[in-house]
Amino acid sequence: MLVIALVACGGDDDPPGEGGGCETSEQCADGLLCVLGACREECTGYGDCPIGSACLEGDDGARGCRLPEENECTEGACPDDTACTNGACVASCTSSATCGGTECVAGTCEDPAVSRIYCEDLAYCGSGVCDFDVCDDDLAIAPSAITTCALRVSGDVDCAGSDADGMLGDGPTEPEEGGLRGLLLPIVLDEPAMMLGVGAQHACVVMDTSEVRCWGRGDRGQTAIAGSVDAPMIAIAAPTEDASVIDEIAVGAHHACVRRASGAIECWGSDDAGQLGDATDHAACEAGAPCSATPVVVAGLEDVVDLDAGDHATCALRADGRVSCWGRAELLGDAPEGTTSCTIDGTATTCRTTPLEVPGIEGAESIAVGGSHACAIVTDGVVTCWGANDAGQAGGTVALPFAAFAIDVGRAHSCALLSDDRVWCWGATPVAQGAPSPVEAMPASFSVASGRDHACARTYDGETWCWGRNVEAQLARETSSETGEPGRARRSPAGGA
């Protein structure tokens, strides 16, 4: 139950100030609205309110900030290494790897299971869904080549974009004409998902039981059925008796990997560049490239704290801040050792089939892998990138005005979320504009995710914004177009929005 504190506000004729009791906004002082019986600062989302507050909506649709006395804490009132977030003191962080199983959101460790905001207190749910009086916000965004998928706090998964090869799963409605769906709609799951990853033409989720299920194109073994296209949702079997909890999933263009609590890394799917990491000559799948439809264990890794997969490579962040990669040689540093000849999409190149430490990377806190380049956030929020730099997407230390606390990369672009809550990108259009620059017209954000040629960010207003390529309607704007400027991703009313 919401408790309103009524305070005295000067003389009998003075209009109530902030926190004063009221019945209508006309009774409040200038600049304040009457919301839920108290005069409050006007807001449109919780991004307009002080840290540790929320934007409340009254029966008449007016919105005002929650009062400090209604919070469990206020800014500056929490112990060191914690911050007041949504009214509670929570641990601060620079990456989810330091949160001990919870998520690093806007610089603080949050457990999504206990930080959900009730719709009766916050009727405005941004891009999320008000489900059983709870704001079921997007917990994670996974843009890919032709789709965008969102994992909500409830464990539901929604996707928009192209249904090529069954990428949209068995949803409640058929895709629109042309195989495109321009609004986020649910993928049918019989239990909540805990993690989500999306590749070029397949997607995977991790369930609460640590079972992995994948769907979409499977002609490179990426959905556990070698030689299958438009594969249904299928469980991926563990390669050994290791049944420890899965802490992370990373989905590349045509392969995927998981990190278990035991420290084991398991990968499956395409191995055309050695990105499975087990130094095995796998037989060719239907697509003509070497692959494994069952997971294999990556050799020589025991202390991995973060994992990411790109188009033809995989990288792991080690506990001591070193980074190891395997697959396409461009991501392994200058003149890497132990490479072999390989063929990627018909082009001869060099690859490595086991992990190799990337030289010159120390003190890394998070990593991101793209088409043929990778980036890491290192000490003090500095971003360094390596690999192909044909569009300016890599090139060593990146000149950014503030420290970065989140990063993700695409085919030939890189994006980082800086400490001023702005998203900066560099590299190829349509996501970036060459040299590092802020994404204009974007609200303050706390997470960023990149697909092949588009990107998305989660904003403090509870919304998901996307920009870049939209040929397959992957920006979730109802219709397709060549590209799209930053704007809010939308859900279909059939999906509960």
Image (spheres, grey):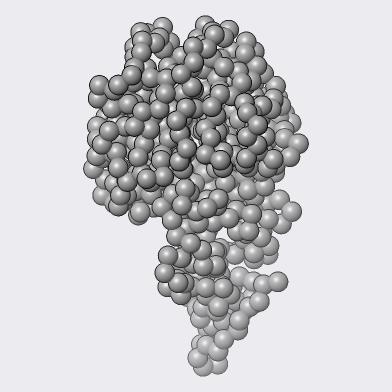
Task: Please indicate, yes or no, whether residue 33 appears anywhere in the rendered image.
Answer: no
Residue 256 picture location, percent across and down: 54, 27
Name the image quarter holding residue 478: top right
Name the side, left or right, on which 483 lies relative to 489.
Answer: left
Q: Residue at x 34, y 32 (%)?
A: 357
Q: Quadrant of residue 235?
A: top right
Q: Nearer the viewer, residue 465 or 359?
A: 359
Can the viewer see residue 495 in this picture? yes
Which of the 4 image quadrants contains residue 330?
top left
Report the front residue among 127 and 247.
247
Q: Pick whichever, 307 or 479, lies toward us.
A: 307
| Residue 94 position within the rendered picture, expressed as x and y whole percent measured from the top left | 41, 52
- Residue 86, placed above or below residue 103: below
Q: Position of residue 233 (x, y in %)?
A: 69, 25
Q: Position of residue 69 (x, y in %)?
A: 55, 78
Seen in the picture, residue 426 relative to 271 is either above or below; the reply is below
Apparent side of residue 171 relative to residue 360 in the rendered image (left or right): right
Viewer-closest of 289 and 83? 289
Pick the quarter of the image with the C terminus. Answer: top right
Q: Residue at x 61, y 21 (%)?
A: 294
Which residue is rendered at x = 64% and y = 54% of the image? Answer: 113
Count how many numbered circles sit on residues in the image.
0
In the figure, 393 relative to 156: above or below? above
